[in-house]
Amino acid sequence: MRAHGWTFWICIALSLLLMLMPLPAMVQPLKPYWPALVLVYWALETSDRVTVGLAFGVGLAADLLNGALLGDQALRLAVLVFIVLRFRSRLRFFPMWQQALAVWLLLLNNHVLQALIRAFAGDPRMPVQSWLAPAVGAAIWPFVFLLLDDVHTRVRGKGAKAT
Amino acid sequence: MALPQKESTPIFSDATAGTLRLIAYLALAAVLMVLDHRNGWLQRARYATAAAIVPIYKLAAAPADWIHGAGVAFTQRSKLIDENRQLRETLMLAEARLNRMHSVAQQNERLKQLLDTQHLLGMHAQLARLIDVQLGPTRDRVMLNVGSREGVRVGQTVIDSHGVMGQVVEILPHASVAMLVTDPDHAVPVMVSRTGLRGIAHGTGDPGQLVVSNLPLSSDITAGDQLVTSGLGGRFPGGFPVGTVTRLERDPSGMFLQALVKPAAELDRSGEVLLLRDQPDPVGPPAPAPQVGPPDSLAPAAAAPRKRTATGAAP
């Protein structure tokens, strides 16, 4: 159980680092929203760890690092995790392609919210290519899922042996 | 099939509570956003937590640094030799030019003394490195590795060897954030160096483009003209290259020209930059035209602090 908790927090920290990490300017707008993907995975896999409040906290940390607008990502991640938890029992048993489609819809919703918040804050409009970012996120979802699942089962297997 | 049934029961039973909780969080987020937008809470929070935040930035920038370092380590020798030769040629050319300029500078100084104005040729600058992280998805900002402890202040001009890059907008104890000239929120007063025509260059959000709008249709400007900072407004010192006009077009109203400008500075996110120190001279350039506009006595109360910052920029 201990190791389990560590894995979760390491995953979250890595996703925040990936969010900050720069990419070549050409593909920069296409960068998937890592914290969302990681939170979706843990919300699907563990029943009680990820709550709306936790998503809010992770979002606040991301805002603090990003330096854009305090509360922006907190709101978006809270909404995202709320939807995932609401449909969790259905999403978990979707085949992979349907799950990827659902992730695309979630990220698209997230992107729409971001555009709305930016419009209210008076920030300039996002580049057109950035609307492809949710699709990129959905395309890599199966790989993210399999990778995290592998790590998760290994750590859990070790934890079960130890106890 | 029994599993989803079993799992869905508790979720839907306290669905209302979940929704209420979500609404509470949404309200909290909205309040935070409004307060931050009004009062700049985020910057204060970032300043307070800088000791924890800056190492995270360094960590996030590390892979890009390694890739860059590996690129340098594995560059071919012949390429390095070529580059070296090219740099030496440029250096010689620059030195020759500098020697010629020296006499001109002396002459200029004499003439300026004759005119009894302050000379601004001695520039105090501080070298800074960029920390390669991405701040916000669509904003042209860069992070520098020097901060308030190294004497950086908000408003300092950031230049590289080719021209103006932007200005410092936020400081942390050992890091600072600079807004690039291409940020949509940024504007810099410019002058066409050929004719002296003045304008304001705005960022567009596109990393390779600035725009100077509201130029009269009859103004003397063509593609290829060099733009330099005009020094008006007291924020940017005059005479630094800003960019080259690439294209002229009518603005949407058809009443004015707008010039599309390619920035002179290399705005990619790596390498070293210079931060210009404010002039230590208490006199500085003449105050920017205090007689423009109605007299101060007619101005509303908000005008007073603004005037103070305009003249107070010199010390």
Image: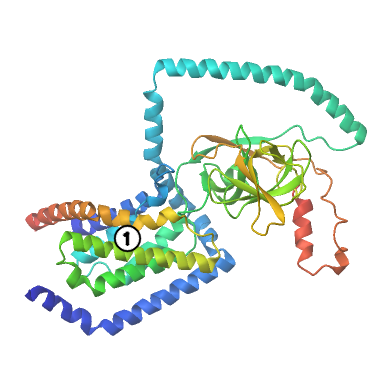
Left or right of B189? Residue A34 is left
Seen from the viewer's position, the closer of residues B223 and B91 is B223
Residue A75 lies, with reference to residue B88, above or below; the image says below
Left or right of B183? Residue A62 is left
Q: Going by the picture, which residue comes out furthest to the right?
A: B114
Seen from the viewer's position, the closer of residues A44 and A100 is A100
Residue A7 lies, with reference to residue B274, above or below; the image says below
In percent of width and height, residue A3 lies at 19, 55
Specify the subunit that label 1 lies on. Answer: A
The total of numbered circles placed on residues is 1
Q: In which quarter of the image is the N terminus of chain B?
A: bottom left
Badge 1 marks a residue whose secondary structure is: helix
Answer yes or no: is residue B110 visible: yes
Q: Which residue is drawn at 46% across and 68% down?
A: A116
In percent of width and height, residue B286 lies at 84, 45
Q: What residue type is labelled 1?
A: Ala
In percent of width and height, residue A102 lies at 25, 65
Q: Residues within 10 Å of mark 1 (few under 14, many from 20)?
A: many
Seen from the viewer's position, the closer of residues B222 and A137 is B222
The part of the image, by quadrant, that contains residue B112 is: top right
In percent of width and height, residue A44 lies at 21, 65
Q: Residue at x 31, y 51 (%)?
A: A14
Q: Name the residue under label 1.
A: A36
Seen from the viewer's position, the closer of residues B278 and B232 is B232
Answer yes or no: is residue A1 visible: no
Residue A95 lies, with reference to residue B18, above or below; the image says above
